[in-house]
Amino acid sequence: MVKILCKDINSGLRLEAVIKMYRSREPREMHKAICADCGKECEVPFKPQNGRPVYCKDCYQKHRRRY
Ligand SMILES: [Zn+2]
């Protein structure tokens, strides 16, 4: 499933970089991050930036449902 998330675009990546990343068959470069919700260590396919909350998969789903 290829789905471009607004979250990735908002995290400062250029759209074309995001598309390239999603289209790539190479393993994505994963960045370690601490979930802003549960505090669990997780890995995200984009570089976490200061001031931007990063959520693990579970919490991301949870937060997305709120909108
Ligand atoms: Zn979490």
Image (cartoon, rainbow, N blue to C red):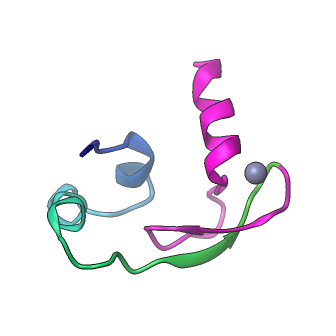
Q: Residue 36 placed where, x, y %?
A: 77, 55
Q: Residue 5 placed where, x, y %?
A: 37, 43
> Could you tell whether 1 is left or right of 49 in the image?
left
Name the residue located 62 percent from the left edge and 42 percent from the top edge: 60
**Residue 46: which quarter of the image?**
bottom left
Q: In this view, does 24 lie above or below 18?
A: below
Residue 33 falls inside the magenta stretch: no
Q: Which residue lies furthest to the right in this view?
A: 38
Q: Residue 26 placed where, x, y %?
A: 23, 79
> Could you tell whether 59 is left or right of 48 in the image?
right
Total marks in image: 0
Name the residue located 32 percent from the left edge and 63 percent from the top edge: 13
Q: Which of 63 and 58 is in front in this view?
A: 58
Residue 57 falls inside the magenta stretch: yes
Name the residue located 66 percent from the left edge and 54 percent from the top edge: 56
Q: Residue 7 placed where, x, y %?
A: 45, 46
Q: Quadrant of the C terminus?
A: top right
- Per the rendered image, the range of residues in magenta is 38-67
Q: Nearer the viewer, residue 43 or 1?
A: 1
Q: Which of 18 and 3 is in front in this view?
A: 3
> Could you tell whether 62 is left or right of 3 in the image?
right
Q: Nearer the viewer, residue 12 or 47?
A: 47
> Could you tell whether 35 is left or right of 54 in the image?
right
Q: In which quarter of the image is the N terminus?
A: top left
